[in-house]
Image (cartoon, rainbow, N blue to C red):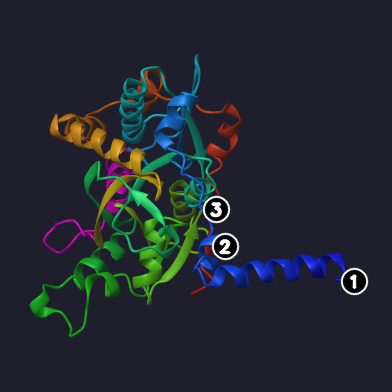
Amino acid sequence: MTGVSAPRRALLGVALIGLSLQGCGLVYDALQYVAPVATDELDAICRRQRVQVGMAVEPFRPFVFPAIWTDEGSRVTGLDVELVRHIVDALSQQCGRPVTPVLHLVRFRDLFLHLSEGKLDLFVSAVPSNMPVRAWAGFAYSIPYFQHGGLSGITRRPDVADRIRQRLQPPSEASPGMTADAQVLAGLAVAVQDGTASQHYAAANLKDSRMVLCDSLPAAFESAEASADPAIDVILGTRPVLEYMVTRVKKEWQLLARADGKPLFLTRAQYAVVMSEESYRLRWFINTVIFRLDESGQLERMRARWLDEPYAFPRRAAVEGLPFDVEKMVSHYSQGECRADRAR
């Protein structure tokens, strides 16, 4: 092949090999990509003796409380933290050696990103597993550890509460086409936390409301109570969290209710542990842990302990809380701000 350059000779060689294999039906086999064998994520946790756990840096009481500083260092507690402790105990038993939880407190909206980047093995923060959210596609959820969740709202203005009750007519008296989720909040300024289920629900359903995006629930409270711009009529959020806040912390606020006094749910939700879609063994393992906690009655005791019992969360954090990187303390207490949703 005098006069033919080396690269051309190489390409001609590949073509000739392809032609010689074509009659044998081997061209596809010769060029087919062979995927690497997937790493067993449960064995990897056992080898590391560490499990990387994500949790929202914003407080979601009683699931995740604000972090505190103790004599032993920074600690965070809550129902989700107790669940993580049970998971870690089961992992230690499975691995035959102690497994340490490494807690990563990040913004809720960033938890899915951190999981997709492989920085986390799992995360919890009252995440609903039954919400049709495009941004949450491609992830896997455990069986529920909390069944009776959902989205609701609160207000500190009696006139707004009365207006909503009046709009919630019985179905036989409602205007044609009126639906509770689409109309009762029409014309009102509704605050939601950026990246959470409440924001995704509002974007899909509350077309006639003015949306206010807040970086955290504390930011929404602060903005509304300071009568800051943009004004906030209603805060939309996780029902158990809102109920905890108005009964124990923000007693000047009230839950939205129907005319008969029954609570207003905009949708129902159940909360689960979030993992990578390909973490099959870990998902089976976590499902088994939650199932056994439920069958033994421990899950119900946990719910009652955090939702019903009187307690001081700093004391529980000092005794049973999980540690996290002290450098995260500053961001934990940075509750952010609120702004009008310009995308609507």
Does label 1 or label 2 sit earlier along the sequence? 1
Residue of label 2: 31
Residue 288 vertical position relative to residue 2 in the rendered view, above or below: above
Horizontal and vertical percent for residue 219? 49, 50
User: On the rendered structure, is 22 left or right of 244?
Assistant: right
**Above or below, comparing residue 194 to residue 2 in the picture:** above
Depth order, front residue of 167/117: 117
Going by the image, does 265 lie left or right of 76? left
The residue under the point 10% across, 79% down is 173
Q: Position of residue 301 (x, y in %)?
A: 18, 30
Query: Residue 52: x percent and y percent?
Result: 47, 34
Disc 3 target residue: 337
Query: Is residue 310 on the magenta stretch?
Result: no
Counting residues from the start of the chain, the first of labels 1 and 3 encountered is: 1
Q: Amino acid at mark 3?
A: Glu
Relative to 339, is 137 on the left or the right? left
| Amino acid bearing label 1 | Thr
The magenta segment is 239-265
Secondary structure of the residue carrying tag 3 is loop
Of 116 and 15, which appears nearest the observer?
15
Residue type beneath disc 2 = Leu
Mark 1 neighbour density, 10 Å: few (under 14) some (14–19) many (20 or more): few
Q: Residue at x 39, y 17 (%)?
A: 97
Marks 1/3 in contact by CB < 8 Å: the verdict is: no
Residue 53 visible at all: yes
Q: Nearer the viewer, residue 13 or 318?
A: 13
Find out whether residue 264 is within the magenta segment: yes
Q: Nearer the viewer, mark 3 or mark 2?
A: 2
